[in-house]
Image: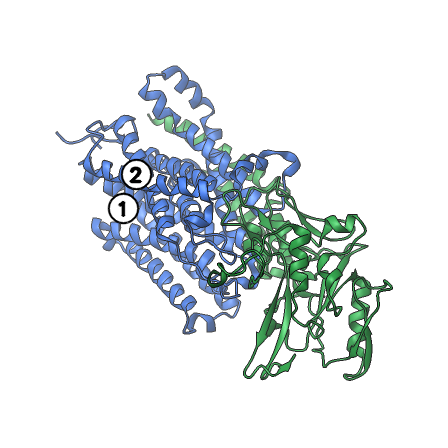
Chain colours: A blue, B green
Amino acid sequence: MAQDTHQPLGGELLTKPFLFLGLLFAIAVYFLVTRFIFGLGSVTHLNGGYPWGIWVVVDVIIGTAFGCGGFAMALLVYIFNKGEYHPLMRPALLGGLFGYTLGGMAVIFDLGRYWNFYNLLLPWYAQPSSVMFEVALCVMAYILVLWIEFSPAFLERFGLTNAKRKLKRFLYIIIALGVLLPTLHQSSLGSLLLVMGSQLSPLWYTVWLPLWFLLTAIAMGYGIVILESTLVTNAFKLSSEQRILRKLSPIVGWLLAAFLVLRFLDLLARGQVAPMFAADMNALMFWIEILMFVIPTVILISPVRRIDQRQMFLAALLLLGAGSLYRINAFLVAYAPGNGWSYFPSAPELMVTIGVIALEIMLYLVFVKKLPVLHGTRPA
Amino acid sequence: MDKSRRRFIQGAAGAIAGAVAPMESAKALRRENKQLPPNALGMLYDSTLCIGCRACVTACKDANDVPVEQPAHLRDWNVGVWDSGEDISGKTLNSIRVFTHGTKEHKDHAENGYAFVKRHCLHCVDPSCVSVCPVSAMLKDGDTGIVTHNPDACIGCRYCVYGCPFGVPQFQFDEPFGKIAKCQFCEHLQKQDEIPACCDVCPTGASLFGRVDDLQKEAEQRLAKQPGDRYDFPRGRLGDDRPTHEAAIPEYESHIYGVKEAGGTQIRYLTGIPHEKLGLPKLPDESYAALSEGVQHTLYKGMIAPLALLGGLIYLARRSTKQHEDEE
């Protein structure tokens, strides 16, 4: 590595791509204003059968899984003590910071009675048996933890070395919480579906839902680290992190392989072979999802393929796609409310989701350019 | 990897395996279904007595102050008067739906016939909506078992809408400050010693209010009669002295719907055709809340498991951070 410290990238902020992202975000703001004035029904296709749409499933459930980079890397660096992956830690945390903070923000505009949001924190309204209660508290706490975990970058930027030294003394507790909280709530996002019973297709409904959600969230966390590192080192012509990524790949590959084997064992144990081969939407989506999981698994395990930077990039993309599709399938495709209800997101609904993602990328760019996030320097 | 680290990781793996091993059978994880409260109140809806007049729908709207609903193609006609919501919604707490088949000639026949069914909250014995609500906005009365909703607590997450196996709670998506709409069994009228509006106005006794155990006996009594026997069908509240509605016992389906479905409900349905055809879903005897809460409690063991895990994580993170510092 050229230099072993975190540095701000510097450079022009208001580039053309940045302004384009700003435009996407402005469109989202327009529809959000509409939503707050006229109600959720005025911009979304939510209905009595499908009370949850992409704002929940994509912005929150998939968004926080994309934010699991910091969690997945902390697991490796601090729990399994693999210090060599440390250079990937801070950018991964940054991704988590935005994935979760914006996911939390999305909750506010999706909540039908957002002005009562603080009831979640009032003990006399608490309902500890509710999976949603656990998820809400855990996610709120984790957003706080992420900001503290990331705060050394701010402290360095503003030269507050004393504060940084003090923070470092108890940072290990924060790091431990930063592993515990996502373990709890990422699995609980799967537990949210346990109450659905026969409303979900047996291809997705299993008591193992919490473990499936946890495993795929960790895999997606590594996926986002590979994707981000490849994109950033290429775009900003930084010294390549391919060597570390190549070491990371088989870990992710075997994690995915374990998930796939366990998933099929569970399907077999529950005797759900017939629905896999039914001529319906569920079976089709199931196999697309499985295929999207299998390809990155093969690439990441194969010693020959994972050397190829393009194949590894493709693997990361497919892995993130597969984890996302798994969540969309489990929450929306597998779900059959009956009574002839159907759901497909409206254009404004999609634009809001796209706008949130645009904001996330914009904030990422601001942070890596202005704060010491990335490792290594540009070759002159 | 040093010894203590390996031991912790092995221990953690063992703990996870221990926690998930019982998952092999969902039965082991499920907590017990909840039991019917002592003075449970409910309704017996006899589909064969229902004539589809929808007086109950109108009475419900008056009693609960919800607006009339008209489908788009009738929106300009008899505005605000002719109610024709096709199912329960954010504005309709109960509705009468019709099943039709073929020539639609015979009432309560699956072949070439038609039949009515009433849709509203079934006031489950072990309700999913109460179990999933993060802010205790759905409440089940410990005595009467009536499931009510508190909009002041509700944050509008709509998990109850998603989770209800009967699709009952509805959110008012077309309102900027919408709320969850759901039949609360005219709790406000019951406080004034009146009965739910739908049962009060039903002319044939198709919707009959009463104590769940009495209603169960009434339903069993009807099933025990021979089709064609004359029978005095009670109206309003079971046990009151309202004049009865005398009619012949029809050919009932032998299954009383609502007794065991999803852990049991406080509504009883008697029908002339199979309940699935009327949109009453086939459900297991176990409540889904029992499984969801059972798994969650198994994994969390009253927050002891997460705290133990946190202890191990703190220990490992501390060692790693120290070691990394030494290397720097």
Q: Quadrant of the C terminus of chain A?
A: top left
> In the rendered view, would you say B88 is above or below A11?
below
Q: Say few, some or many: other residues with alpha carbon within 10 Å of mark 2 (under 14 / 14 to 19 / 20 or more).
A: some
**Amino acid at the residue labelled 2:** Ile
Q: What residue would you read off at disc 2?
A: A361
Q: What residue would you read off at disc 1?
A: A246
Mark 2 or mark 1: whose residue is earlier in sequence? 1
Tell me where residue B110 appears, x and y as whole percent: 61, 81
Q: Secondary structure at mark 2?
A: helix
Depth order, front residue of A360/A146: A360
Give the chain of mark 1. A
Q: What residue lies at 80% left-to-right and 78% top-to-bottom?
A: B224
Q: Say few, some or many: other residues with alpha carbon within 10 Å of mark 1 (under 14 / 14 to 19 / 20 or more).
A: some
- Is A21 placed left or right of B288 in the picture? left
> Extreme left residue here?
A380
Q: Secondary structure at mark 1?
A: helix
> Extreme front residue here?
B78
